[in-house]
Amino acid sequence: MIPHQVIIRPVVTEKATDLQTALNQYAFEVAKKANKIEIRKAVEILFGVKVEKVRTMVQRGDIRRVGKFFGRKASWKKALVTLHDGDSIDLYGGEQE
């Protein structure tokens, strides 16, 4: 898998932002078949940072209801990537100088 297939999108939530500031951890939605080694290499190539640790989990799809019909959202895989001290990722696309 190429790095753009492994990393689908960053997870930008209040909890993920707190992890960025406190522990230098970033959350990404990744391909379900990607393993920790592929995720580590993809983050290092795409963002040019040094990865210290990768933790993964599968987020189960919850049940949603529309009227009388029930359905289930798709499950997805989340990766928490811990970076070395001094490294950071600019997820919001700040100004480049």
Image (cartoon, helix red, strand yellow):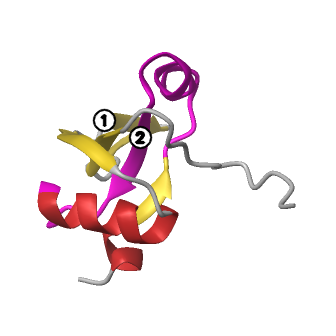
Report which quarter residue 68 is drawn in.
top left
Query: Looking at numbered disc 1 in the image, what kind of residue is underneath it?
Result: Asp
Residue at left 31%, top 35%? 62
Residue at left 63%, top 49%? 91
Where in the figure is residue 18, as x and y percent of width and height?
53, 18
Left or right: 6, with 56 as reference point: right
Q: Residues within 10 Å of mark 2 (few under 14, many from 20)?
A: many
Query: Looking at numbered disc 2 in the image, what kind of residue is underneath it?
Result: Ala
Where in the figure is residue 6, as x and y percent of width and height?
31, 70
Residue highlighted by disc 1: 62
Q: CA distance from mark 2 to mark 1?
A: 20 Å
Q: Earlier in the sequence, mark 2 or mark 1?
A: 2
Magenta-colored span: 11-36
On-image quarter of the C terminus:
bottom right
Where is 47 relative to 66, above or below? below
Query: Residue 27 shows which numbered tag?
Result: 2
Residue at left 22%, top 40%? 53
